[in-house]
Amino acid sequence: MTIRFALLGAGRIGKVHAKAITSNPAARLVAVADAMAPAAQAIASQYGCEVRSIEAIAAAKDIDAVVICTPTDTHADLIEQFSTAGKAIFCEKPIDLSVRRVKDCLKVVAANKTTLMVGFNRRFDPHFMAVRKAIDAGEIGEVEMVTIVSRDPGAPPIEYVKRSGGIFRDMTIHDFDMARFLLGEEIETVSAQASVLVDPAIGEAGDYDSVSVMLSTATGKHATISNSRRATYGYDQRIEVHGSVGSVAAENQRAVSIEVANARGYTRPPLYDFFMTRYTQAYANEIATFIDAIGGKAKASPSGEDGLIALALADAAVTSVKEGRAVKVSEVLG
C-alpha cells in the first residue's frame, strides 16, 4: 500500500519533509500548498507533484495524509480541518502556543478517531534511539540524571522570533520531549533561567537566546537542558544519561568521523551545520513510522498528548523565568 501525501508549507522544514516522503518507497507526494506560490512550485517541480489549495487538498480523494509545516499559529486550525476531512495528520511542533487551544484541538482529533503524529524528530535519531535502547536493556541501571545540550549555530531572523512563541516553545520544546523520552517518567517541576547574550534584538522582541532548565520528576530524577542561539563551532547536539550502574551518551555528529593527529595536535572535521543535515535520517525514520501508524503497524508516537505535555513544560519554563521560582507542571495543565 502506498500512502498518498500532501505537504502543507513549502518552507525550510517543508523541504526536509518533502525529501523524506519522496525517499520512502511506501509514500508518494501528490500535492503541495503554500501561500507563497514560487515556494510551492519549486517543490512541485523538483518532485513531480501538483500545486493545490488547502481546500482542494482537504476535499481530494487521492490524498490519504497531510504533513503540516505551516506557521505555528495555523497548526490547530489545519489539524481540525483535515481531521474532519478524514486525513491522517503529521504536524510539526507545536500544535499551538496555547495549552487550552491544544486541548480543544485534540478533542476534535479524538472525536474523529484521526491518526495524529507530532514532529519531535529527535526521538528518531539513530544515536538517540540507541541511547534509549541501552536504557531499556538495563545497561546503565535505573536512570537518575539526564543532561541535554542543544545549541544552534546562529539566531533565527527577528521576524521568525516574533512569531515563534519564544525560545522555550520553539527550540527547548524539542529538549523537553527528549527529556521525557529518556527519563521514562513524567516531569513534575520546572525551574528555568534565561538571558539575552547573543543578540539584543531578540530581547527587544520579548524573547531570550540563552537558557538553562532543570526538570524534576516525582521520584527525584532530573534532567538539565542547556540552550543557546549561538554555537560558533557548529550545531551542538549532545545527550548523556547517568544511571545507577553506569552512563550512556550520544556525542556530536560530523559528516565524516575521523581524527587527524600530527605536529599541530589532534583535529577533527567540523560538526554538521544545522538540523537539515544533522537529522536527515531522523526525519526519514519519522515519516516511515507515520506511514506504519497509518497502516496500523505502529503507534502514532509522538502523539498529540506528547505535544500537549511538551508545550505545558515550555509554558512552565516561561513562568519560572518571569516569577523566579520552580513551577509545577500541574499549574499549567490544570
Image (spheres, rainbow, N blue to C red):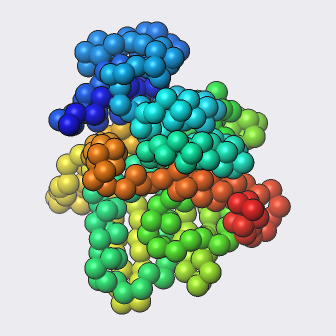
Task: Say above or below: 141 vs 196.
Answer: below
Residue at 43% x, 9% y is: 38
Q: In this figure, what is the number of numbered marks?
A: 0
Q: In the figure, is residue 227 to the left or right of 200?
A: left
x, y percentage for residue 177?
51, 58
Residue found at the far right of this picture: 323
Residue found at the far bottom of this picture: 245
Residue at 55% x, 63% y is: 225
The C terminus: image quadrant: bottom right
x, y percentage for residue 75?
57, 34
x, y percentage for residue 236?
42, 53
Quadrant position of residue 272: top left
Q: Is residue 153 visible?
A: no
The N terminus: image quadrant: top left
Quadrant position of residue 216: bottom right
Residue at 33% x, 76% y is: 136
Residue at 26% x, 19% y is: 47
Residue sitting nearer the eye, 217 or 263: 217
Residue sitting nearer the eye, 26 or 271: 26
x, y percentage for residue 137?
28, 79
Q: Is residue 179 visible?
A: yes
Task: Say above or below: 37 vs 320.
Answer: above
Q: In the figure, is residue 117 to the left or right of 130?
A: right
